[in-house]
Image (cartoon, rainbow, N blue to C red):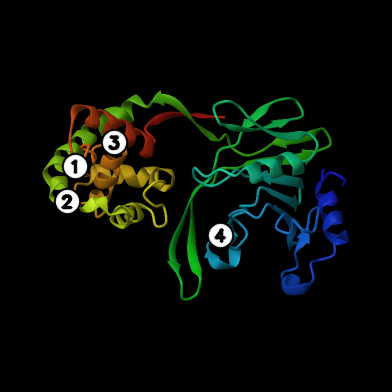
Amino acid sequence: MAQLNSFDDVVKRYNATIPLRGARKAQDIRPIAERRYWWARIEKINDNKYALHDGMWSWNRQNNQGMDAYDLEPITWERKADGDYITIRNCPNDGMSISRYNFLRWYLPEGLSFDYNNTGRHWVTDGKRVQHYLPKYKCKWNNHNPANNQSTFEMIEDNKLVFKHTPEGFVRVNELQPMPTRRIDKALTKHYDVKTKELYDWMQAVLPILGETLNDYSTRNQYANALHQGAGFWYWTRYVEPMEMREILDDPEHEKRMAFAVMSAFEAGMFNDGSTQRFTPSKEGFSRLKQVVRKVAKLYAVELK
């Protein structure tokens, strides 16, 4: 099937594709390629904007209040008064999706290609072989209400790449994107190492009270979900918002301080004394705690790419 290399190509494909019939008829689903892979589809947002869906994250807009303000699909084509533009997005937060990466490989137009390196960073390379860093956007889904199946969507960092389609090829037009490095931010680390020591001293006074209650997995999940609803015990570090983690460290009275203390202690291996899951402070545990804080509070230097 022909590649979608322009706004006009996308419009032509959309108009030439017969919508799915049957149970999904009312949804106007027009698959990009094979109809059995219906979730990979073209959506007409309006006459001047078309979205290419891969079926991940952006699919259920109507059930996520606030999502309509953003184009979260991997590829969005838009015609403006001064020309045609393509917006490219990665996955949200620290999520990953081989399906999305393949989708970008398959459906980016000629002159743009998706790639990654051995550090796990993702790039879009233009026709002049210039690499443009493609970070993951940061967001929150909050307050799921089973009664109406509604959630609220909040964008934290609107990371994306935007190119204008010109006769000479695709030209990057949006701001440089933040790329984390492995170098610590010395000013931030100096401040939050002190705050981490204050937290650690507080943990030693408070966490022993919990005894062995955290042997219960559901109890651990409650603390994780207090930091980010739905994150769960194993994945909480992927979903917490760094600025909120800094607020917790700065504010001894923060309502989430206990949850942060419990989960950070677990992550640092201080709830495992060999036989039970009691809080067990140690010099090594404090050293690991500092690493946990640097990770979740994003205390590493950032370069703009």
Q: Is residue 64 left or right of residue 208?
A: right
The answer for how far apart the CA atoms under marks 2 and 1 are is 8 Å
Crowd around label 3: few <14 · some 14–19 · many ≥20 (10 Å):
many
Label 1 to label 4, Cα distance in Å? 41 Å
User: Of the numbered discs in the image, which one, if any, rests on residue 210?
Assistant: 2
Task: Name above or below for residue 34 compared with residue 280.
Answer: below
Residue 110: percent from left, percent from top: 81, 37
Residue at mark 3 to residue at mark 4: CA–CA distance = 35 Å
> Which is more foreground, mark 4 or mark 2?
2
- Of mark 4 and mark 2, the one earlier in the sequence is 4
Residue on which the image places disc 3: 268
Q: Amino acid at mark 4?
A: Met
Dot 2 alpha-carbon crowd within 10 angstroms: few under 14, some 14 to 19, many 20 or more: few
Q: Are marks 2 and 3 in contact (CB under 8 Å)?
A: no
Q: Are marks 4 and 2 in contact (CB under 8 Å)?
A: no
Query: Quarter-wise, where is residue 35 in the image?
Result: bottom right
User: Contact, CB < 8 Å: mark 3 with mark 1?
Assistant: no
Most distant residue in the front direction = 275
Residue at 56% in and 38% down: 135
Question: Label 3 vs label 1: CA separation?
Answer: 11 Å
Question: Judging from the image, what secondary structure is the residue with disc 1 in?
Answer: loop
Res. 279 mark: 1
Q: Does residue 47 appear anywhere in the picture? A: no
Q: Earlier in the sequence, mark 1 or mark 4?
A: 4
Residues at circles 2 and 1 in contact by the CB criterion of under 8 Å: yes
Q: Secondary structure at mark 2?
A: helix
Q: Which residue is mark 4?
A: 67
